[in-house]
Image (spheres, grey):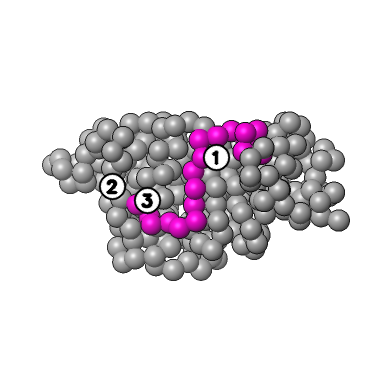
């Protein structure tokens, strides 16, 4: 696809089959229709990962649904991330979601939805527990001028993140195999304009470490369930905005907060 990047296996990663290396593998796509613009790929035991052109169509629908404007190279970088995720997920557990259309909606669309709620941060983005790269990598691709640090203590997942960054040719993105409590006591303290956490219910200690990372006026964006968001928003540690429902999700929201002491 025009503007897309080419993925490659990492030296430390077991070799994965090349697309088209086996015969007799088929792909069925059932279109959901105009409601979402996405396609459902029905998994079969002999089904290979779909071609990049199909992944790109899913991502173009995501970008269109969100009303974002991304260049062809940016959509190409998202496609490379998507393609590598499917291939590496065959060997290491990056996501329990297997269907490409569900990955597009649950991971990529949910991550990029934050870019419709906030302008690009004027400083460092720190993604805590980045895992397969969500939301940090899609946000960095959408905001290429924003420096990003992805925190992932699992070495296999960190290796995957580094490979995506390499394959996409991303600049200004760094992976650290550290936990938040470690990073909050490094040179990154008081530097983050935005800290993101996804699918993690923040404890008081975790939020205190987030505060250590934040620069004056910095924000934290939490991706979590509605009930957990209600509990967190009752805490006085941050000035919390009203939670925003994630499109086409079941009771999943984004909760954005700003340190009320730092922002004065």
Q: For the point 76% across and 54% down, which residue is it?
A: 216
> Splitting the image into 4 quarters, where does residue 161 fall?
top left
Marks 2 and 1, the one that precedes in the sequence: 2
Q: Magenta stretch: give its range.
A: 167-184
Please tell me whether mark 3 sits on a helix, a strand or a loop. helix
Q: Position of residue 139 (x, y in %)?
A: 54, 55
Res. 33 visible in picture: no
In the depicted view, which residue is nearer to us: 148 or 246?
Answer: 148
On screen, 226 above or below 258?
above
- Which residue does the numbered mark 3 point to in the structure image? 166
Res. 2 visible in picture: yes
In the depicted view, which residue is nearer to us: 147 or 128?
Answer: 147
- Which residue does the numbered mark 1 point to in the structure image? 151
Tell me, yes or no, whether the two marked residues, 2 and 3, touch with CB atoms within 8 Å.
Answer: yes
Residue 188 painted magenta: no
CA gap between label 2 and label 3 equals: 9 Å
Q: Position of residue 202 (x, y in %)?
A: 69, 34
The nearer-to-camera label among 2 and 3 is 3
CA gap between label 2 and label 1 equals: 22 Å
- Which residue does the numbered mark 2 point to in the structure image? 8
Query: Which quadrant holds the N terminus?
Result: bottom left
Q: For the point 45% across and 37% down, which residue is it?
A: 158
Please tell me whether mark 2 sits on a helix, a strand or a loop. loop
Q: For the point 47% across and 66% down, which residue is it?
A: 70
Marks 3 and 1, the one that precedes in the sequence: 1
Residue 180 painted magenta: yes
């Amino acid at each position: 696809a025009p503007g897309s990047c080419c993925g490659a296996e990492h030296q430390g990663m077991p070799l994965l089959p090349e697309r088209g290396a086996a015969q007799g593998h088929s792909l069925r796509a059932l279109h959901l229709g105009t409601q979402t613009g996405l396609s459902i790929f029905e998994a079969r035991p002999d089904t290979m990962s779909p071609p990049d052109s199909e992944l790109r169509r899913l991502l173009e629908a995501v970008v269109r649904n969100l009303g974002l404007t991304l260049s062809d190279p940016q959509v190409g970088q998202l496609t490379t991330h998507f393609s590598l995720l499917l291939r590496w997920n065959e060997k290491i557990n990056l996501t329990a979601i297997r269907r490409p259309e569900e990955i597009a909606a649950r991971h990529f669309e949910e991550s990029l939805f934050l870019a419709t709620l906030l302008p690009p941060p004027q400083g460092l983005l720190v993604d805590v527990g980045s895992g397969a790269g969500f939301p940090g990598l899609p946000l960095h691709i959408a905001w290429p001028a924003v420096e990003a640090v992805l925190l992932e203590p699992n070495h296999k997942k960190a290796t995957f993140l580094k490979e995506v960054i390499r394959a996409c040719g991303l600049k200004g993105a760094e992976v650290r195999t550290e936990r938040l409590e470690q990073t909050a006591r490094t040179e990154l303290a008081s530097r983050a304009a935005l800290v993101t956490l996804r699918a993690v219910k923040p404890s008081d200690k975790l939020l205190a470490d987030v505060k250590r990372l934040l620069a004056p006026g910095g924000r934290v964006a939490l991706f979590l369930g509605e009930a957990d968001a209600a509990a967190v928003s009752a805490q006085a540690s941050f000035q919390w905005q009203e939670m925003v429902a994630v499109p086409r999700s079941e009771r999943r929201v984004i909760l954005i907060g700003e340190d009320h002491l730092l922002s004065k």
